[in-house]
Image (tube, rainbow, N blue to C red):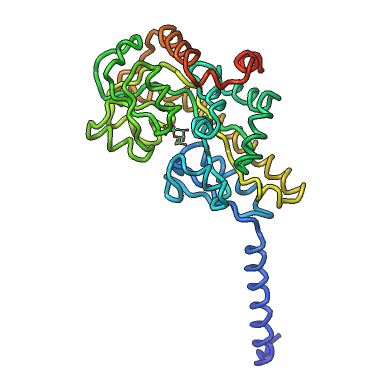
Amino acid sequence: MTYTITRRAVLGATAAATMIFAAGIAAAQDKIQLRMSTVATETDQRTVALAEVFGPGVAAFANYEPHYNGTLFKQATELEAISRGNLEMAIISAQELASFYPEFSVFTAGYLHRDAAHQVAVFNNALMDPFKKKVEDELGVKLLTVMYLGRRQLNLRTEGTVTTPADMAGVKLRMPGTDAWQFLGKALGANPVPVAFGEIYTALQTGAIDGQDNPLPTVKDSKFYEVTKQIVLTSHLVDLNYLALSLDVWNKMTPEQQAATQKAADEAAETGRQRQLKLEDELVQFFKDQGLKVYEPDVAAFRTQVQAAYLASPYAASWPEGIVEAINAAN
Ligand code: KDO
């Protein structure tokens, strides 16, 4: 059988192709835009899980567009960006929320959350409702889910052994720029120095700071172990982040789209959580193999000092009555 290609057939095919192409563009344009800004890297297990699980979970109706390493918005400016309608999503911290609403500092207190499961129990507990409502009503930001960053440990370029908070005296410890973070640095007995996440490596390398604190997976992912000598396993903060979404965007979604978005966010958070936990288990040996000293200090001494510092702080005065007991009881 032979085919005769006529001019009319070619024109017809071209027109059809153009229509299909145009329809494709229209479909893409009709999708909800979800630009997500974070200072985290694209190899961080939370952002990997978002790309692998959240993006595909909303792909039928939304374009998930992640921006890493603080390239779209700088650390701690994301909440305001969402609030002003300049950004749709971000990975944010309770410390950043505490800059707007001091009562959020309760979720930043050292030695309060017990572990990853406790974070989830607290986030899903009714005690969180007034916190979530305030952020929605006043900032226009919906806290979709809680993400596990990990247990923060001291990671120092100094050599002296750290046993108690007294050994941290005079240590220039990098903490993120917000006040609630700086407070934690002081509570640990150190001299906190504000440095943006993306500048930690160079600050360690040049000696501008003596150390930093982050969970083990972050120390590996951002290669801080290359420019430090020891990791002191204080586990002073079981650290969380919230996945934040513009409430305007959420309100424009259909109930089906909202349900799919929530499900995708929770599943991505769970995937990231399991991967971070696994890495935390595995990495002690990795750092030892790299020549770092890794050891437990007198954790009870750190816990006593840090908890006392929070309870005596102006932050505690902003905590709703009974909240610490409610957090402790959540499971
Ligand atoms: C950091 O700046 O040390 C920190 O760990 C703080 C967290 O709240 C979070 O912003 C995190 O950085 C980034 O997601 C990078 O891992």
Q: Which quadrant of the figure has residue 142? A: top right
Residue situated in front as seen by the camera: 134 or 244: 134
Rendering coords of residue 150 (x, y %): 49, 26
Residue in the foreground of this view, choosing between 243 and 283? 243
Residue displayed at 55% across by 17% down? 114
Q: Report the residue at 61% width, 22% height from top.
A: 117
Classify 206 as above or below 22. above
In percent of width and height, residue 15 lies at 67, 82
In-front residue for pair 200/10: 200
Q: Is residue 64 left or right of residue 42?
A: right
Residue 255 in the image: x percent, y percent? Answer: 77, 47
Q: Report how many numbered discs are placed on residues in the image.
A: 0
Q: Could you tell me which residue is drawn at 42 percent across and 10 percent down? A: 305
Q: Is residue 282 above or below residue 176?
A: above
Of the 4 image quadrants, the one containing the N terminus is bottom right
As drawn, 252 above or below 119: below
Ligand 1 resides in the quarter of the picture at: top left
Q: Quadrant of the C terminus?
A: top right
From this viewpoint, which residue is outermost toward the left?
206
Instruction: Name the residue furthest bottom.
Output: 7
Where residue 51 appears, x then y in whole percent?
55, 46
Left or right relative to 252: residue 277: left
Residue at left 55%, top 19%?
113
Residue 161 falls left or right of residue 81: left
Say whether residue 229 is visible: yes
Whether residue 291 is visible: no
Q: Report which quarter residue 286 is drawn in.
A: top left
Q: Residue furthest right?
A: 255
